[in-house]
């Protein structure tokens, strides 16, 4: 079970940005649903659940990545052997949602081909 204080802090965080590049501000937030924590982006065309954390874990923090180039987890050889690896790095320009857990992991949520895609970053 997620400690109530951590869940309340995560639930109170709303990050605003044009994450889908449509010229309209979107809202990203964490919510609890069906015993899981979900990272959600809400825009003018509806909601997208971009990540679901398993129960018992720490709630993910939310923020925006500053513009720049970031190494991905695939650059370190981390990832599934069954799924094609992301590029070794990504370049971020414009509003890009980031989420993760302190001192554990960080991901970028990229808008590509009409949908959101999560790319795990290297430390």
Image (cartoon, rainbow, N blue to C red):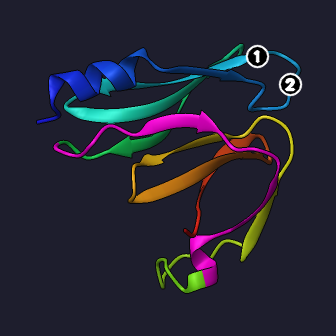
Horizontal and vertical percent position of residue 49:
49, 34
In the displayed structure, 28 sits above or below 123; it is: above
User: Looking at the image, which residue is at 74% across and 32% down?
Assistant: 19
| Horizontal and vertical percent position of residue 39 | 46, 34
Residue 24 location (% of width, % of height)? 82, 15
Q: Nearer the viewer, residue 53 or 101?
A: 101
Quick one: 51 or 94, which is closer to the camera? Answer: 94
Q: Going 76% across and 16% down the picture, which residue do you hit?
A: 25
Q: Is residue 50 left or right of residue 119?
A: left
The CA span between labels 1 and 2 is 8 Å
Is the C terminus in the top left, top right, bottom left or bottom right quadrant?
bottom right
| Residue 45 or residue 6, whichever sits in front | 6
Report the span colored magenta.
56-75
Quarter location, residue 38: top left
Which mark, by number, is residue 25? 1
Screen quadrant of the N terminus: top left
Estimate how packed mark 2 is, as few (under 14), some (14 to 19) or many (20 or more) residues with alpha carbons within 10 Å: few
**Where's residue 20, x and y in %?**
77, 32
* Disc ID at residue 22: 2
Q: Which mark is residue 5?
A: none
Which mark is in front, 1 or 2?
Answer: 1
Residue 110 position (above or below residue 32): below
Relative to 41, is 96 on the left or the right?
A: right
Residue 84 visible in the snapshot: no
* Residue drawn 37% across the image and 26% down it: 10
Mark 2 secondary-structure assignment: loop
- 81 with respect to 45 (left or right): left
Element at badge 1?
Answer: loop
Residue 5 at least partly seen: yes
Q: Assess whether residue 8 is covered by the magenta stretch.
A: no
Is 64 located above or below residue 82 in the figure?
A: above
């Amino acid at each position: 079970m997620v400690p109530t204080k951590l869940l309340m802090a995560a639930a109170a965080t709303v990050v605003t940005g044009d994450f889908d590049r449509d010229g309209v501000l979107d809202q990203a937030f964490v919510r609890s649903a069906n015993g899981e924590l979900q990272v959600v982006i809400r825009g003018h065309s509806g909601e997208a659940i971009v990540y679901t954390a398993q129960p018992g874990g720490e709630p993910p923090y939310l923020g925006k990545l500053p513009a720049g180039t970031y190494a991905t987890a695939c650059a370190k050889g981390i990832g599934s052997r069954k799924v094609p690896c992301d590029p070794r790095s990504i370049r971020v320009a414009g509003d890009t949602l980031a989420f993760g857990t302190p001192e554990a992991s960080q991901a970028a949520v990229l808008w590509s081909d009409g949908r959101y895609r999560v790319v795990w970053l290297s430390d």
